[in-house]
Image (cartoon, rainbow, N blue to C red):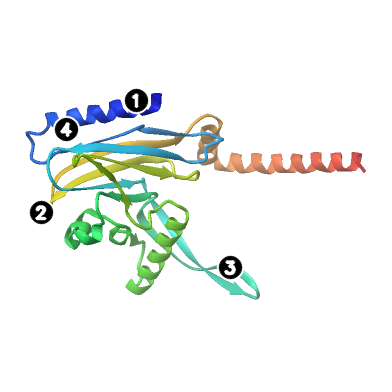
Amino acid sequence: MIAAVSIFGLWLAVLLQGTAAASTENPVVVDLSKDFVAITAGFTGTEVLLFGTTAGKGQVVVIVEGPAVNATIRHKERVAGIWVNGDEVAFENVPAFYQVLATDSLDEWLPLPLRETNQIGVEYLQIRPLGDVDPATAAEYRNALIRNKQLAGHYGKVEGRMTIVGGRLFRSTVFFPADVPVGVYNIRTYLIDNKRVVSSQVMPLTINKTGLEADLYRVAHKHSALYGIAAIVIAILAGLGGNMLFRRNR
């Protein structure tokens, strides 16, 4: 009940903000139920509520995009009955997470040039290979990269739908899985009318590890050699300890 009242208060504040901005041509105002997601040892994924209002007509499109990273896709080959890594292609500026939300099906109304310019939809992401790669190979590995991201739940297969209330209020939820990449996410919101963007807003969402998870993460990345040695030592000690217990119980 308290959570519902809290969300209602936030939504009311957004509505009042949107009404105050009505002097601007077709403004759009959006907010999140939380702007920081903490990943702890027991983290199993979470949902973030996205809600807002418009002061004019048009359709709303929201893009939830994670930090850009480099990614490598490897082709698996079977050699003498064993699967090994074969050819590989590396890509730059790959969104670690990508989800599109819209108030209506994009294929029915959103012009292709607008989708290409604003990278609305996974097929329009400007993911380019590193190095000299022929177009056919780049397209094949790019499609494999997107499929892997979709299977992991980091990319949406289709756009999510936003609920419209009273013709002006909109809301939707975004689910972040347990293995969601950490970093600062951009929430890009577009109000589109008559085949053009009439208003837009960008806001950040931070996802980061906290507590023991954060400490281990920092050590693993800043002191990788030390972390690796410690992991090996712990594994050896655990093995010796288990062996001693097994001998005692025989």
Q: Report, in whole angstroms, how far the alpha carbon at label 2 lies from the one at label 1.
A: 36 Å
The mark nearer the N terminus, 1 or 4, is 1
Task: Assign a secondary structure to mark 4.
Answer: helix
In the picture shown, does residue 107 fall above or below 136? above
Disc ID at residue 5: 1
Identify the residue at image location x=70%, y=40%: 233
Give neighbour class at mark 1: few <14, some 14-19, many 20+ (Cα, 10 Å): few
Which residue is label 2 attached to? 194
Residue 166: x %, y % from top left: 20, 39
Task: Assign a secondary structure to mark 1.
Answer: helix
In the picture shown, does residue 224 fall above or below 116? above
Q: Report, in whole angstroms, how far the alpha carbon at label 1 lies from the one at label 4.
A: 20 Å
Residue 139: x %, y % from top left: 35, 69
Give neighbour class at mark 3: few <14, some 14-19, many 20+ (Cα, 10 Å): few
Identify the residue at image location x=29%, y=42%: 187
The mark nearer the N terminus, 2 or 4, is 4
Disc ID at residue 158: none
The mark nearer the N terminus, 3 or 4, is 4
Which residue is label 4 attached to? 18
Q: Report, in whole angstroms, how far the alpha carbon at label 3 lies from the one at label 4.
A: 56 Å
Q: Nearer the viewer, mark 2 or mark 3?
A: 2
Which residue is label 3 attached to? 84
